[in-house]
Image (cartoon, helix red, strand yellow):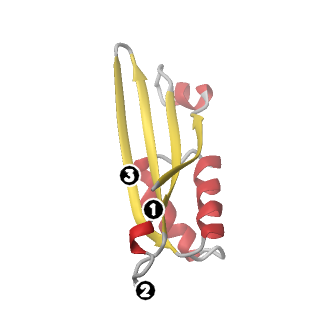
Amino acid sequence: MNIFFGGTFIRKEELKEAGIDYPIKLEYYKIINENELTKKDKSKYGIKVVKTEYIENNIKTEDKTIKYLCSSEQKIDEILNILKNNEVTPIAIKDVISDISKSSLSI
């Protein structure tokens, strides 16, 4: 089950610096792996990041899902807050998760 955690639009100043003149929205979802609750080797929680670009007469979406990330809902919420506050896109998610797992947050 996917639960909407939060969303944000990338700041116009950042888009202008990158030469982008259209809005980009980021959405973050908490995944609860209900069917996997009985399996000991699978984590209960995951994440999904969706990027939507609103280009003239065209909407382009990109997403990345990490289905099994950790067993703690508190930690998954902390991770999602980090991703949202730093406007992490789907393409960067694996690197950011790797950095988080090496930090004191430890997944």
Which marked residue is nearer to the observer: mark 3 or mark 1? 3
Among the two numbered marks 3 and 1 on one chain, the one whose residue lies closer to the N terminus: 3
Q: Amino acid at mark 3?
A: Lys
Judge the density around disc 1: few (<14), some (14-19), many (≥20) Cα neighbours within 10 Å: few
Q: Secondary structure at mark 3?
A: strand
Query: Is 77 or 82 nearer to us in this picture?
Result: 77
Which marked residue is nearer to the observer: mark 3 or mark 2? 2
Among the two numbered marks 1 and 2 on one chain, the one whose residue lies closer to the N terminus: 2
Specify the farthest residue to the top: 57
Q: Residue at x 57, y 33 (%)?
A: 10
For the residues labelled 3 and 1, say whether their Cβ atoms are less than 8 Å apart. no
In 3D space, how far apart are the residues under numbered discs 3 and 1 (Cα atoms)?
A: 12 Å
Q: Secondary structure at mark 2?
A: loop
What is the number of the mark on residue 40?
A: 2
The residue labelled by disc 3 is 64
Q: Secondary structure at mark 1?
A: helix
**In which quadrant of the rendered image does the C terminus lie?**
bottom right
Which marked residue is nearer to the observer: mark 1 or mark 2? 2
What is the number of the mark on residue 107?
A: none
In 3D space, how far apart are the residues under numbered discs 1 and 2 (Cα atoms)?
A: 26 Å
Specify the farthest residue to the bottom: 40
Residue 94 found in image quarter: bottom left
From the viewer's perspective, is 34 left or right of 3? left
Measured along the vertical axis of the image, is residue 97 above or below residue 39?
A: above
Image position, residue 54 (x, y; %): 43, 23
The residue labelled by disc 1 is 95
Among the two numbered marks 3 and 2 on one chain, the one whose residue lies closer to the N terminus: 2
From the viewer's perspective, is 81 left or right of 60? right
Q: Amino acid at mark 1?
A: Asp
In 3D space, how far apart are the residues under numbered discs 3 and 2 (Cα atoms)?
A: 24 Å
Image position, residue 14 (x, y; %): 58, 32
Q: Amino acid at mark 2?
A: Lys
